[in-house]
Amino acid sequence: MAADQDVRRHVRGNRSGLEGPREVSSEPASSTRPLRVHFFTSYVHEQGTYFRYHNLAIGLANLGHRVTVYGCDLKRNAVARREERDGVRYEIVPECRMQSIFSQMNNPLTAARRFARHYPPCDIGHLFQPFLGAAAAWRRCPARARFYDWDDQWTGGLISGPVQSSRDRWMRFATRLLEDRLPRWATHVIAVGDYLGEMALKRAAAGVTIVPNGYWPAPFADKTTARSKLGLKSNAFYVGFMGRTSAELPWCVDAMTAVADQYPTLRLAVCGPPIEDLGVVPTAIGERIDYLGRLSAADTRDFAAALDLGLLPLADIPFNRSRFPIKFCEHLATGNPLLCSEIGAIGRLVREFDWAIPAGTTRDEWCRSFALAVKQMVGGNRRQSDLVRFAERMSWAGLARQLETAYRTSLGASAKATG
């Protein structure tokens, strides 16, 4: 299937587009020997890309590989330390001063500190995000192969609009420089979807492998129990939005407003973003919104399980084309339907799973799709889920195996070239 190719293809040096795997020799040592893998990250708090690298690290460790995450604590008064998180070793250094001048992610003092550290030799040095401190450590580390992981478009995506200050100007300059050059500096690029994979090839990447975001299969609470734990109404028809990236949250309010009079039990549950992100809410609609604020990871699982219909609206902008929201998997893993815009990597996957409901690419298409989905579900038309197939495709365990294959293929190619 086309979507299957999107997720699983392995690319070697094709400048005209993404292609399927090519055969290369195995690395000289046993192809099953444990690899020593170093992840280099800009921060270690539980937000954003943390959930990608941490879960991939767990998956690799479960396969028997020795994984160490080298990261930075951005909090004031942080201390250098070693931690173990879910069986993964973390080596953490504090951020240097002068953040107000240079920014947290691209502080040259932190980069110098991290470059000066000793890193033991490894098979794979794997960098996440295009920021100076982690990139300096990645370049310093003696690695047989260097991987760059690209999961968001920063320049022209997350970073856009007018420059606000000299600090902002430096942040943009350093990020743009690294985002442009890291694909060709790396032995291989891991991209979250085809959009960034194609972009990496245009920037002279030697090869690209597509590895999306995933989830860990685990039992969920039943809907009644989940609602009780969160204080939601037991007899309502709940649609729900979760996540901190909430620019399109007003789309959900618009869609609710258009059909609210037809469905007296329809309610909108929201967790993650600040309440201001809801925008201007009519009084009658505001009374039907359950705002739960920021929830723990365990509570977000209950949130997803409590819904009748999950909501994932995405505007057609470069940032959304480049990313793969983890909540796509978190919603679908419950077996509850998800209404999802057809943007980026998830736009190509949404039609593969019957309980993922495509909602177009615009605000108007979103509202029309919302109205139709609610009408069908309230009328008793329930979509069938296939959680076994979903786990085979999207579990972190399977994605870690894909990453392992990319590592060994790259090491084998390097051995062949030098042999």
Image (cartoon, helix red, strand yellow):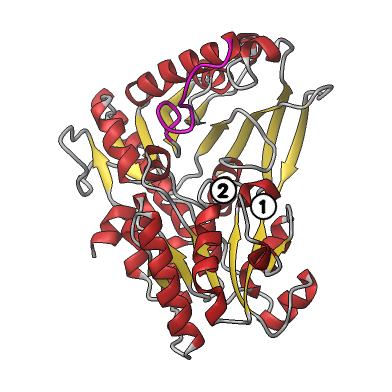
Regarding mark 1 in the picture, which secondary structure is present there? loop
Is 232 situated above or below 32? below
Q: Which residue is drawn at 53% across and 15% down?
A: 140
Determine which of the numbered discs, if any, sits on residue 340 in the image. none
Q: Which of marks 2 and 1 is nearer the N terminus?
A: 2
Q: Position of residue 407 (x, y in %)?
A: 40, 40
- Name the residue beneath numbered marker 2: 246
Reading the image, the residue beneath label 1 is 272
Name the residue nearer the viewer: 182 or 138. Answer: 182
18 w.r.t. 41: above or below: below
The image quadrant that residue 43 belongs to is: top right
Secondary structure, magenta segment, majority class: loop
Residue 330 spot, x, y in % from top left: 56, 62
Name the residue nearer the viewer: 401 or 301: 301
Give the side of residue 57 with respect to residue 86, left or right: left
Q: Can residue 419 be seen in this view?
A: no
Residue at left offset 43%, top offset 78%: 386
The relative height of residue 297 versus residue 238 in the rendered view (above or below) is above
Q: Residue at x 73, y 52 (%)?
A: 294
Q: What stretch is highlighted in magenta?
A: 153-165
**Amino acid at the residue labelled 2:** Ser
**Res 169 visible:** yes
Q: In this view, does 78 lie to the left or right of 66?
A: right
